[in-house]
Amino acid sequence: MRRCSILLALLALCPSSTPARAQDAPKKIIFAIGGWKSPKDALPLMRYFVGLTGKPNPKVCLLPTAMGDSSDSIVSWYDLMNQLECRPRHLRLFQPSKVDSFEDYLLDMDAIYVGGGNTLNMLAIWKEQGIDKVLQKALKKGIVLGGGSAGAICWFDQACTDSRPGKLTAIDGLGWLAGSACPHFDLEKRRAAYPDLVLAGTLKDGLACDEGAGILFEDSKLVRVVSSLPKATAWKVTRQDGKIDLSPLEAQFLGK
């Protein structure tokens, strides 16, 4: 009986393993970029993105699905990323694959970057190929996810897009970040259309991001806005009392 009491007392002193596991779980990081005006503006943002891995010379993979895996987008990727301390890679989905498994290939990366283009088509292809599920596994594993334009808005509940002919419209995203999103917000067409869609209730309240600005999320929470252009930033777009409120967020300037 005495031995049992001693054992129980020792167990009470031992910390539970469950909180330790939760504490050690990797952060779920998503970096959404509103686009950029030139490769020069892109470089500080991509250097920041690579740095989010916390690893020396990380493997960073481009998913150029939204651009139909165009050769030009892939060449531009290597031109940009070869200026940084990383190992750039890419994965095409439109052609017969040279990899044995999309999942094995992507989960071996330190960061995955989603390029711009047609968001609607990209999401449809991802669903058919199971890429959406693989990216969710990557996020949980601690692989840094990010992207520009289509690659910025795809993570949200909803988004403002030019994926369809004609005017800008609303689409549903992956739903990993709450609310709606809009890239290229410093462009006149976007700055008019996105607030109108929110005001009409077609899109939820959300975030808009200028070209040259990026929004960092950790565990689904917005933690920082950074920019490679002095005036670029992100904006909270909300509907209040039948009107739209545009609130700029303070951005950390990364320089050029």
Image (cartoon, helix red, strand yellow):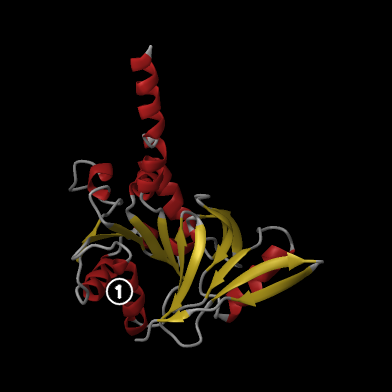
- Out of 256 and 94, give the one closest to the viewer: 256
What is the residue that sits farthest to the front in this orientation? 2
- Looking at the picture, how far across and down is residue 160, in whole percent? 58, 63
> Quick one: quadrant of the N terminus?
top left
Residue found at x 34% / y 51%:
142
Residue 3 in view in this figure: yes
Q: Say whether residue 117 is visible.
A: no
User: Where is 133 relative to 38, above or below?
Assistant: above
Report the residue at 19% width, 71% height from top. 85
* Residue 202, quarter of picture: bottom right
Q: Nearer the viewer, residue 220 or 9?
A: 9
Q: Is residue 124 above or below residue 206?
A: above
Residue 91 spot, x, y in % from top left:
26, 55
Residue hosting label 1: 47
Residue 179 drawn above or below residue 140: below
- Residue at (44%, 76%) from the top-left corner? 226
Q: Amino acid at mark 1?
A: Arg
Label 1 CA crowd tier, 10 Å (few <14, some 14–19, many 20+): some
Q: Place residue 90 in its image quadrant.
A: bottom left
Residue placed furthest toward the top? 1
> x, y percentage for residue 48?
34, 72
Whole-percent x and y of residue 178?
A: 57, 54
